[in-house]
Structures are given as C-alpha cells and as structure tokens.
Amino acid sequence: MIVAIANQKGGVGKTTTAINLAAALSLRGQRTLLIDLDPQANSTMSYLDVSLVTRTVYDAITEKDVGFADIILPSTQPNLWVAPSRIALAKLESKLVGELDAHFRLKDRLEAIQADYPNIVIDCPPTLGLLTVNALVAATHLLIPIQSSYFALEGTDDLLETIEKVRARANPALKILGVVITMHDKRTALARDIRSQIDKVFGSKVFKTVITKSVRLEESPAYKESIFKFAPDSSGAAEYYRLCEEVMDRV
C-alpha cells in the first residue's frame, strides 16, 4: 500500500495526518516508510534531527547512483522509517524539465525498496506540480485531508481533475481512499455546516473519523514524537488510530 496524502491547499493538516497515520500503521507491527515530498520538510523535522540528514529524496530522485535505500533513516518510532526532505527539493521541477520520465521518477525509484515496506505514506506539498504528480503516479491510494473551514472545498475541483488526468494515462489503478475532515471544531455551527457540505460532495468517501482541533497534535512534532508517544491518552491519538483502522479496512 502506497498512500499519497494530498491537497493543494496549505494548512489543512496534510503533514499532521501523514506523520500520525504513518505512526499508527507502524504501531500495528508492520514496517512503514514515511516519504517527505514537501520542500518545507516538516515531516522530516517531526521525526529526525535534520543535522544528521546528508541525503534526501531529491538525491534519490535525481542521482543515478543514489537510491532510496541510501537516504532512508530510522525514526524515533519503532517500525517507522523516514525518507527525508530539504528545501533543495523545490528545485526538482526545473531539474527534470524536458525529461521524458519526469512524472515516473518516484515510482521507478521506489520499486527497489517497496518489498521492504508494506506501508508507504507520502506527504505531498501544497501544490499540484511535479512533486505531487510524482506521488500520484507512484501511489496505490490517495487520502485527501480537508480542513473544516469556510474555504474547505475551494480548489478541490482542480485536485480531482489532476487525479483523473493521472488515472487516464500514468496510473489507472490509483484509488481515492477517502477524505478526512481535519481541524474540526464541533462546537461551532459553521463547522457542522462545512462538514455537511463535504459529506454532500464526497458522500461515502468521507471517513467516519473526524480529526478535531487539538493543541497536543500541534505540539507533538516539536518533540519529534508522534501523537501516540507524546500524548497517548489524547483525543488526537484516539482519532488517528481510528482513522488508521478505517484506512486498513478500506484497503
């Protein structure tokens, strides 16, 4: 299973979902790889000391003599490894311009290590550029986080159009795993209305689990820990574990 977590809107909980879904999968006892495909490198900083990172996803995708096996590092979470990122990843699009296999680089590079990691989670950048397209081409499933806010559905048409283009040629097997509502404040009428709108647009694709607003979820990356280690009894830990169970049921 290769799950890309994507939405071109920023601040919708992509990285929070990526780092905690990957951790939840690892808690099930299976080797899990978290690929940080965002030049901001927030997933990387959530688990690794960046001073120890010498090679990144950028090197694995662009250099012929560097593979993913050369860049992957163990996280602080048992059964969880990280393929780190750095700001240099932002140069990937210009580096690969004109290359015939530009959209397939990630998929091709992952083939060598895929058997070692039954679960792979890809944290995508908040764009629909080459990095996100590489993730969609490599992925078996797509998970879309949508923030419970007034502009929640803005831009989803563009994302769905990109998905259909990828399905049409590069990756016909790509499945939409589901939509997860994040940063939800169930106390407000607006949040309840937004949730109703999301349900109308995506129907059965919306996960039953809703991720509520949580200070603990915001704090845990600063301690380089998943929510399960940082605050195991918190609502965020319970919600992300339930989300993980739903993900496995759908797969």
Image (cartoon, rainbow, N blue to C red):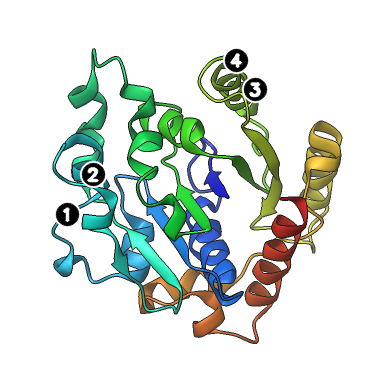
Q: Tag 4, which secondary structure?
A: helix
Q: Amino acid at mark 3?
A: Asp
Camera-near label (2 vs 3) is 2
Q: Residue at x 35, y 62 (%)?
A: 82
Q: Which mark is drawn over residue 60?
A: 2
Amino acid at dot 4: Ala
As helix, strand or loop, the secondary structure at mark 1 comes to loop
Amino acid type at mark 2: Ala
Q: Using the numbered discs, state the Cα–Cα distance from disc 1 to disc 4 in whole angstroms.
A: 34 Å
Percent across and percent down for residue 131 are 37, 33
**Residue at figure coordinates x 68%, y 37% from the top left:** 176
Local crowd size for mark 3, using a 10 Å CA cut-off: few (<14), some (14–19), many (≥20):
few
Q: Earlier in the sequence, mark 4 or mark 3?
A: 3
User: Where is residue 240 shown, x and y percent of the image?
Assistant: 65, 67
Question: On the image, numbered disc 1 is attached to which residue?
Answer: 55
- Amino acid type, residue under disc 1 in the picture: Arg
Please say if the residues under marks 2 and 1 sit with CB atoms less than 8 Å apart: yes
Is 251 above or below relative to 230? above
Residue bearing mark 4:
168
Q: Earlier in the sequence, mark 2 or mark 1?
A: 1
Instruction: Quote the CA–CA distance across marks 2 and 3.
Output: 32 Å
